[in-house]
Amino acid sequence: MGYTLQFGAIWASFDKLMSGLAIGLGLAIAAVAIGTCFGLLAAFASVGLSRIGRMIVTCYVMVIRNLPLLVLVLLVYFALPQAGIRLDKYESFIGALALYSGAYLTEVFRAGLTAVPKGVVEAARAIGLTRIQTNVFVTAPIMLRNALPSLGNTFIGMFKDSSIAAAIAIPELTFQARKINVDTFRVVETWIVASGLYIAACFAIASLLRRLERRFPKF
Amino acid sequence: MQTFLDQVWIARWPLWDGFLLTIEIAISAIVLGTVVGCICGIQLLFGPAISRLLFRLYVDVMRGTPVLVLILAAFYIPSVVGISLNATQAGILALSLFAGAHIGELLRGALQAIPPGQAEAARSIGLTFPQTLTYVLLPQALRSALPPWINTGVELIKGSSLLSIIGVGELLLKTQEVIGRTFMTIEFYIFAGLLYLAANISLDQLGKMIERRVQGR
């Protein structure tokens, strides 16, 4: 024992931690933005008419949800070059996280879709909107509003998972914390500060999302 | 393909050991996490104010921090405060704390979802609080908490892959070692992925089977 807390060394490299936090947020935003496209496509396909489409979506969701993210990241970063696809570490991590979040978002959007009242869709059809118009102007907005809370949770989850980028040497928060840990040996302080930053960021995102939810009243 | 199968055959024992260690880690973490989670869930609802506050803090900290940060913290911190844990023990500690918080929160939710009439009825026929908990509330709560509990198990198997970063020789690290020797990157990562998939899907199916048994009664 006899360990005394000294935060001085951590504050000295606090800017590195903050830049790491920004990188983590950037990775999560990019990945969830792409993942949202995947998720929307897959969700519409999973309630669509094509049987093959539904089967592909089921397989995609099942495989990704049961695969560790780290395996996916390593596969994209280290294995794809063997197949002739070269991505830098940021691209490959965003790609892997987008694929990963896409599977979770598929579930989120599918739940949102099934919660759209049938009467609304029938009403849209009755006033003469085409199928595509109904989907774009009626179903999609209601579905997005329904899915907003889970979408927010998925985003927070993906932000936390951006820590795995440290495994392929992307200098985000966990990577920087580990470096400071090894450089200064202020072990306890480093991890207190790093996890404090993650928690603060998660709470900030959560309260921001709650304000967004209040802006758009539930249908 | 033939050479890949040969390489798998050559590496079968390391890969098998890694797979077993992955399963062992996940089982230890779910057992310890369930113990912590049961205490945590009951304390969150029925504990005195001070322990409610402490457990709420514990749950929020664990749920707000990435698993990888928990693992690294559990790996580095014990040694400087004079506790010696090896990498595997540190990893199990981190995963158990993580699982404990999640299970605590989902048990709290399940307990809260039981209509208050149940507890009132139990009190009115003269059961003490521990009796109410063991004979009335927990059996119902555990039943409805089963699906998310299985889900936590899947998360733990997935999370155990992160222990490769602190040098625990589980499936992913063994795979990386084999890749370092054979340079068959795609093949072996996909192979490891399939093993994880098989473990998780069978756990999922097991969960569904138990669920059907429990709900059938």
Image (cartoon, rainbow, N blue to C red):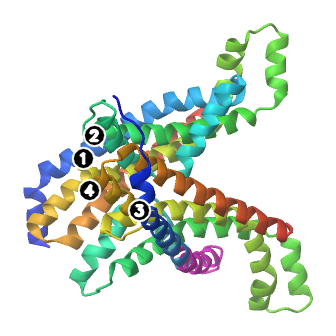
- Between the residue at mark 1 and the residue at mark 4, the CA separation in whole angstroms equals 9 Å
Residue B172, numbered label: 4
Depth check, mark 4 against mark 3: the one in front is 3
Q: Is residue A43 magenta?
A: yes
Mark 4 or mark 2, which has the lower sequence index? 2
Which residue matches tag 3? A13
Which residue occupies 55% across, 45% down? B61
Depth check, mark 3 against mark 2: the one in front is 3
Q: Is residue A75 magenta?
A: no
Indicate the position of residue B160 as horizontal and vertical percent values.
35, 48
Do badges 4 and 2 share one subunit? yes
Do badges 1 and 4 share one subunit? yes
**Local SS, label 2:** helix
Do badges 4 and 3 share one subunit? no
For the stretch drawn in magenta, the main secondary structure is helix
Give the residues drawn in magenta, as a range.
Answer: A31-51
Do badges 2 and 1 share one subunit? yes
Which residue matches tag 1? B168
- Between the residue at mark 4 and the residue at mark 3, the CA separation in whole angstroms equals 32 Å
- Between the residue at mark 3 and the residue at mark 2, the CA separation in whole angstroms equals 30 Å
Do badges 3 and 2 share one subunit? no
Which residue occupies 83% across, 70% down? A215
- Between the residue at mark 2 and the residue at mark 1, the CA separation in whole angstroms equals 6 Å
**Local SS, label 3:** loop
Which residue matches tag 2? B88
Q: Amino acid at mark 2?
A: Thr
Any part of residue B198 in sight: yes
Q: Residue furthest top?
A: B126
